[in-house]
Image: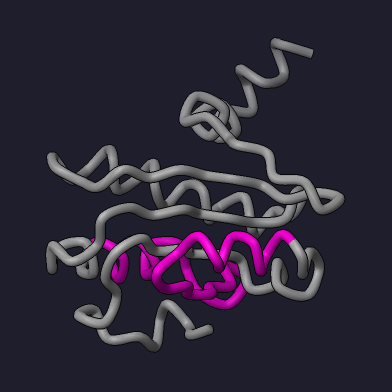
Amino acid sequence: MASLMSTNVYAPKGRVLIYGTCLENMEPEAFLELCSEADCAYSVCLEETHLNMAVTKLSAMLGTGKITGVTFASVDRSPHCVQLHYIAHEIERTLPEHVPMESVVVSGGKRYPISPEAIELSKSLIRLSAMT
């Protein structure tokens, strides 16, 4: 597996998996399953890389027209990994045309699809607080 930030923007093609670096060690079986469904996989640690840099990198990759879909995958309960799912939200918000994107969180070996509405809500502590 390669690092998102050190990969040439013209390299990815087909279905792409972008995953939080710790997913491979923390959830190895689910990680391998996710990799088997992708044409290529790239890790990113948003504890080391600023979110905006990852958004810019993936936007450039999408601009090549060689990517047909993106899956974002992370572990649960990480304040850094939750940002991984904001990448899709930012791209969908700023690029008029984009490929299908999905987000999943892995916990206890099980994959959980995360809706765009949940991602948006996770960015609003006021709305979340009102719900509790």
Name the foreground residue: 51 vs 31.
31
Q: Give the vertical position of 83 relative to 49 (above or below).
A: above
Residue at the spot 39% in from the left edge and 64% down from the top edge:
16
Left or right: 34 as drawn, with respect to 9 = right
| Residue 87 % position (x, y) | 41, 52
Quadrant position of residue 31:
bottom right
| Residue 79 % position (x, y) | 70, 53
Residue at the spot 42% in from the left edge and 73% down from the top edge:
40
Q: Which residue is at the far right?
A: 108
Q: Give the vertical position of 22 relative to 106 (above or below).
A: below
| Residue 12 % position (x, y) | 29, 75
Left or right: 65 as drawn, with respect to 12 = left
Q: How is the image coloured?
A: one colour
Q: Give the vertical position of 15 relative to 125 (above or below).
A: below
Which range is magenta? 30-59
What count of labels does the image hold?
A: 0
| Residue 96 % position (x, y) | 13, 40
Let me know if residue 41 is in the magenta part: yes
| Quadrant into which the C terminus falls | top right
Residue at the spot 48% in from the left edge and 85% down from the top edge:
2
